[in-house]
Image: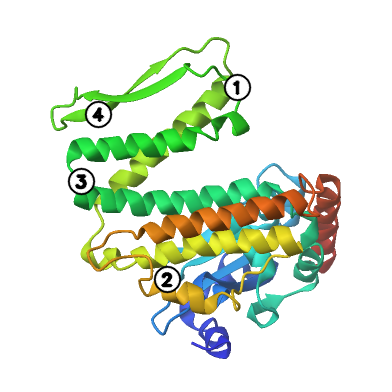
């Protein structure tokens, strides 16, 4: 679909919720494309994803209750409230940062508030992006590995693979959470207690005076790896065809992070990388037997090294400009009150 065809489709009854939903309607300040169309990596069968931002009503600005986002699954549309969007942007969340870096013609609707947000997008950009983009890319790789592992390996080997994935994730725990001793968390595979397994992962812990919330976050990371593994294992044959697409987006995230650090700009539309990324989507790193090519790991390591080099020389700050972001949010809220 062309951008004009997409704009026309938004006028159809399927998108009436954009005009009638109480939190949306005349409160939308920015509406743009997401997904493959936004990345310049669409095919004739690609779905249309819509992303946007909506301001708060006066009651929400002054009161206790605010909406966070509206998700309409049938049309794959997500509209964030302005306050929730600002929170995610300060975290350098890739899924929301990309909304700020679309091609100008991909912004379907922009009012003065939306233009103000785009004009000040630099306030949100920081070195935090490295951890976030690496995390998203690693999650994509874990899904791929877990799927291939489940299809090719015996149950004990599968369990060993999950253990390796969790241990790999734990390598970053000291950077994100309160420090703990080298032997305070010990994971290992042993004869299973569960009757439907031959081996399973066990855990020995030795914590004293450790922050509960940090422990909770670590546990959630480990638990998410296991849940993701189980989820991927139940994919059907049609979904299997999407594996190459996951590899493509994994590499796209790393390329986007590199540009962000090097140039200080969000580049959502991957024009210069299109041929390479589409070759990945067409099976560059996946064999006909469904096995991941070793060359993919070489490419990932090379891209991560480039990102680390860019991180060392980037002009981006260590963290976003929180005071200026707060002033921007206040300004946008005042503009909203004046408009309505």
Q: Which numbered marker is on residue 280? A: 2
Q: Mark 1 points at which residue?
A: 179
Q: Earlier in the sequence, mark 2 or mark 4?
A: 4
- Helix, strand or loop at disc 1? loop
Check disc 4: other Cα within 10 Å, few if <14, some if 14-19, many if 20+: some
Q: Which of marks 1 and 2 is nearer the N terminus?
A: 1
Between tags 2 and 4, which lies in front?
Answer: 2
- Helix, strand or loop at disc 3? loop
Question: Would you say residue 5 is visible in this rendering?
Answer: yes
Q: In which image quadrant can residue 214 be found?
A: top right
Check disc 2: other Cα within 10 Å, few if <14, some if 14-19, many if 20+: many
Q: Which numbered marker is on residue 200? A: 4
Check disc 3: other Cα within 10 Å, few if <14, some if 14-19, many if 20+: few
Marks 1 and 4 sit apart, C-alpha to C-alpha, by 27 Å
Residue at 77% x, 44% y is 318
Q: Name the residue under label 3.
A: 153
Q: Are marks 2 and 3 in contact (CB under 8 Å)?
A: no
Between tags 1 and 2, which lies in front?
Answer: 2
Residue at 26% x, 62% y is 290
Marks 2 and 3 sit apart, C-alpha to C-alpha, by 25 Å
Marks 1 and 3 sit apart, C-alpha to C-alpha, by 35 Å
Q: Earlier in the sequence, mark 2 or mark 3?
A: 3
Horizontal arrangement in the rendering, residue 124 relative to residue 293 (left or right): right
Q: Do the residues labelled 1 and 4 touch (CB within 8 Å)?
A: no
- Helix, strand or loop at disc 2? helix
């Amino acid at each position: 679909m062309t951008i004009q065809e997409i704009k026309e489709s938004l006028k159809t009854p399927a998108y009436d919720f954009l005009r009638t939903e109480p939190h949306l309607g005349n409160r939308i300040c920015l509406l743009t494309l997401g997904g493959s169309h936004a990345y310049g990596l669409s095919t004739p069968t690609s779905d249309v994803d819509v992303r946007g931002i909506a301001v708060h009503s006066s009651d929400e600005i002054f009161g206790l209750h605010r909406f966070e986002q509206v998700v309409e699954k049938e049309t794959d549309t997500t509209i964030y409230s302005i306050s929730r969007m600002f929170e995610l942007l300060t975290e350098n969340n890739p899924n929301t940062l990309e909304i700020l870096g679309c091609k100008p013609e991909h912004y379907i609707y922009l009012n003065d508030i939306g233009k103000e947000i785009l004009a000040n997008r630099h306030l949100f950009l920081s070195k935090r992006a490295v951890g976030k983009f690496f995390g998203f890319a690693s999650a994509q790789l874990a899904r791929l590995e877990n799927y291939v592992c489940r299809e090719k390996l015996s149950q004990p080997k599968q369990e060993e693979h999950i253990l390796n994935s969790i241990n790999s994730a734990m390598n970053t725990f000291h950077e994100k959470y309160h420090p703990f001793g080298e032997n305070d968390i010990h994971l290992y595979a042993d004869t299973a207690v569960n009757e439907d397994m031959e081996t399973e992962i066990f855990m020995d812990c030795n914590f004293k005076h450790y922050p509960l919330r940090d422990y909770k976050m670590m546990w959630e990371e480990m638990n998410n790896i296991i849940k993701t593994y189980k989820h991927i294992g139940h994919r059907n044959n049609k979904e299997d065809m999407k594996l190459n697409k996951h590899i493509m987006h994994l590499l796209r995230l790393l390329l986007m992070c590199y540009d962000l650090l090097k140039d200080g700009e969000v580049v959502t539309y991957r024009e210069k990388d299109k041929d390479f990324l589409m070759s990945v989507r067409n099976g560059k790193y996946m064999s006909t037997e469904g096995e991941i090519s070793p060359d993919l790991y070489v490419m990932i390591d090379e891209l991560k090294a480039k990102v680390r080099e860019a991180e060392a020389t980037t002009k981006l700050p260590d963290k976003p400009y929180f005071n200026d972001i707060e002033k921007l949010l206040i300004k946008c809220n005042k503009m909203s009150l004046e408009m309505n």
